Image: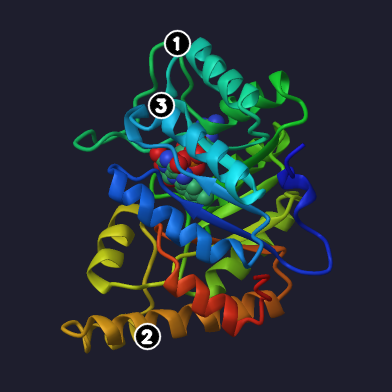
Amino acid sequence: MPQRIKDVYGGSSWGLSIEIFPPKTPQGDSALFETLDRLAVYQPDFVSCTYGAGGTTSKRTVELCVEIQKRYKIASTAHFTCMGGTREELLNWLNFASESGIGNIMALRGDPPQGQASFEPVAGGFRYAHELVSLIRETFADNGIGVAGYPEKHPEAESLEIDITRLREKVDKGADAVFTQLFFGNDSFYKFRDACGQAGINVPIVPGIMPITEFARIKRITAMCGALIPQELASRLEAVQDDPDAQFEIGVEHAIKQCRELVDAGVPGIHFYALNRSQACERILEAMGRTAVL
Ligand SMILES: Cc1cc2nc3c(=O)[nH]c(=O)nc-3n(C[C@H](O)[C@H](O)[C@H](O)COP(=O)(O)OP(=O)(O)OC[C@H]3O[C@@H](n4cnc5c(N)ncnc54)[C@H](O)[C@@H]3O)c2cc1C
């Protein structure tokens, strides 16, 4: 049985998970597997694969998860969103994932498709991720379930406090761990973690780290998800906007510092948004003394 999310955290070392996305071309597939060849030696506890907007990569997500488990003997986690269809269609997909040997699901609402201002649930489907968590827990009692948390609050939420009460609902419905949106200032994570504890959320809260490798790309990503780039970091990156190598070095150096501090502060694990590339994660893992088993 592949490792379940609930069994990853709380041991003597911090849990490691790597998030990737389904490539759109055969070349992208080759590059992804080269990346995974390089990262697998650090023995991640699982690799998670995203689920595309509008369900475009619906089957691909599961197929990639299956391939990862087969090639690397590493557990995988399939992301799934409420955009996947009606309740019945969601169930069909969950059955497909389960029959394919996938034992962990990252249960999400999903973002509105491009050009649509707000999230509209599918008719006969779900409006919130907690409904998907309930469906998974009721139907596949042994499944591992991860959910999303937002140290700087979800962009649609009225306040961080309200957002955390909704996170609590996802945990009460059966989530095993919370994986956070990317953030660049650890203070926001510590405040979020403390507030979650006060709100009675007692599952592992795993920080999500995206190493900055290209300033222009990270600006696009943060504009979409609402994560803040601290002024000092932004100024350093602005100063080298014509020098991609310097941007990479600043980004990796920042991520190493962030990860070291987080591990020292006792986080249960780190979830890397690897963007299908290995170089930055390899540098960070080496700097953190994570042993590569060759
Ligand atoms: C680790 C991680 C992985 C992700 N992977 C993917 C992916 O693979 N594919 C993808 O499309 N997106 C992915 N996302 C993005 C995610 O789909 C978006 O952030 C989305 O906007 C919210 O999803 P959620 O699951 O947090 O939704 P929810 O938990 O449903 O929250 C959405 C909003 O609704 C509010 N809300 C929740 N419950 C209630 C309630 N009962 N009443 C009123 N308001 C409520 C919340 O406060 C929040 O503002 C990921 C995000 C993270 C952090």
> Could you classify mark 3 by the number of other residues whose Cα lies within 10 Å: few (under 14), some (14-19), or many (20 or more)?
many
Q: Residue 45 placed where, x, y %? A: 68, 55
Q: Quadrant of residue 112?
A: top left
Q: Mark 3 sits on what residue?
A: 83
Q: Mark 1 sits on what residue?
A: 124
Q: Say if mark 3 contacts mark 1, CB within 8 Å.
A: no
User: Which residue occupies the foreground of this view, 163 or 232?
Assistant: 232
The residue at the point 48 percent across, 14 percent down is: 89
Dot 3 or dot 1: first in sequence order is: 3
Q: Say if mark 3 contacts mark 2, CB within 8 Å.
A: no
Q: CA distance from mark 3 to mark 2?
A: 37 Å
User: Which quadrant does the C terminus fall into?
Assistant: bottom right
User: Which residue occupies the foreground of this view, 113 or 58?
Assistant: 58
The residue at the point 62 percent across, 30 percent down is: 133
> Could you classify mark 2 by the number of other residues whose Cα lies within 10 Å: few (under 14), some (14-19), or many (20 or more)?
some
Vertical arrangement, residue 216 with respect to residue 66, above or below: below
Callout in the foreground (3, 2)? 2
Dot 1 or dot 2: first in sequence order is: 1
Q: Mark 2 sits on what residue?
A: 249
Q: Secondary structure at mark 3?
A: helix
Amino acid on which disc 2 is placed: Glu
Q: CA distance from mark 1 to mark 2?
A: 48 Å
The residue at the point 64 percent across, 22 percent down is: 99
Does the image show residue 117? yes
